[in-house]
Structure formats: C-alpha cells, structure tokens
Amino acid sequence: MLDCISGGRLVAGLPLGSPMDVNLAYGITPMEHRERYREAFELVLKAWQAKEIFAWNGKYFQLGQVNLWPRPVQEPHPPVWVPGSGSISTFDFAAEHNVCYCFLSYAGARAAATMMDGYWEVASRKGRDANPIARFLQLVAVSETAPAPRKSTRGTSSTSITSASTFRGRGSRRRGTRTTGAS
C-alpha cells in the first residue's frame, strides 16, 4: 500500500534483529529467530511479485491463499534494505539476496569502516558489486560550538543501543541471542 501511496518510492527496511523481549513475548526462541525471518523474507518477496493467488506452506507460516492487493508499483518489488549491527550471517544473507546491507553505527567512522570492510569482503566473495548494495547509518550531532554536540549527546549512543537490545537489563550479547562472528 505504501508503495502505491508514495507513487513507487517505498524503500522497505526489513530488519532481522529485534529486542529479545519481543521474541520472548511471541514465544520465539533465539535459535529459530533467523530461520523464521528468512522464511518471512521469502514470503514477502513472493507476495510482492506473484501475479496469481498462491498457497504458502512453510515451516513457520501456513497461508492458504496469499493475494496481495494493491500490488507494489515498483517491479519486481520495492528496494529492500536489511539493517544490521555487524552479524556475519546478516552480511551473508544480504549479499546472497542482493539487497542493501545497512550498517547501524553508533561507534564512529573508524569502527563503521572496519565493519563495512568486512561486509565488502563477503559481498566480493559472493560476486556482488560494492555499490549500491550497502549503506551505513551514523549517529551525527552538530552544534554552534565544537564541544556542544559531545556534551548534548553524551550517553545517546549507549542509550540507543541499550534500549534497542535489552530485556530486563540483559542485552542481545547474551549467549544464544547472536550468531557466531557477530559483534
């Protein structure tokens, strides 16, 4: 619907991660989270592209009649961005599906450059061009004086990261909540 309303300007952000409290509220274990996401991703792409009604009988989702209306304006579907915080398996997923990997950086340009260099290596190994399949979002603050942005944003990065990844004080760094190689 948004693609139609915007005249074909939708960019679909499909983040893989979510705070653990969301998963736990829906009874989703950390071990099945990525597999469930991948199935949902394939379902959404198929629904956007299908010209006819179809049934979906996946491991996690069973839908007798998928009939998307209105269909997206953009063909074959709106651009997809997969935001992430550095998981190697998310790098692989974005490169395999030839979608934009969007690194969410709160740690500065050097840290972002290191992370994106890792992504470019994965993309290159999978035969993908360096652009336009990746971006990164950097927290930036400006002010009239040099010290003011630092002072006014002190704690913003850690607050943003903490609020987006905690469940009763236990963040997404808990064992079993991130894939191997994630940072």
Image (cartoon, rainbow, N blue to C red):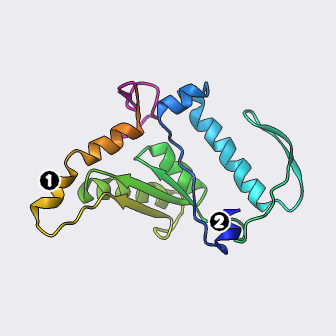
Characterize the local packing of mark 1: few (<14), some (14-19) or many (20 or more) Cα atoms within 10 angstroms.
Answer: few
The image shows residue 9 at horizontal and vertical percentages of 61, 72
| Residue at 50% across, 39% down | 18
Q: Residue at x 89, y 58 (%)?
A: 52
Q: Nearer the viewer, residue 30 or 170?
A: 170
Depth check, front residue: 30 or 157? 157
Per the rendered image, the range of residues in magenta is: 168-183
Is there any visible trace of residue 108 in the rendered image?
Answer: yes
Q: Is 182 covered by the magenta stretch?
A: yes
Q: Image height check: is 161 above or below 107?
A: above
Q: Where's the C terminus, which quadrant?
A: top left
In the image, what residue occupies the spot 57% across and 52% down?
A: 14
Q: Regarding mark 1 in the picture, which secondary structure is present there?
A: helix
Q: Is residue 13 above or below residue 164?
A: below
Answer yes or no: is residue 118 visible.
Answer: no
The N terminus lies in quadrant: bottom right
Quadrant location of residue 174?
top left
Q: Say whether residue 56 is left or right of residue 9.
A: right
Majority secondary structure of the magenta segment?
loop
Hey, what amino acid is under mark 1?
Lys
Q: Residue at x 35, y 26 (%)?
A: 169
- Residue type for callout 2: Pro
Q: Mark 1 highlights which residue?
A: 151
Q: Which mark is residue 14?
A: none
* Residue that sits furthest to the bottom in the current view: 7
Q: Which mark is residue 78?
A: 2
> Seen in the image, is 44 located left or right of residue 84?
right
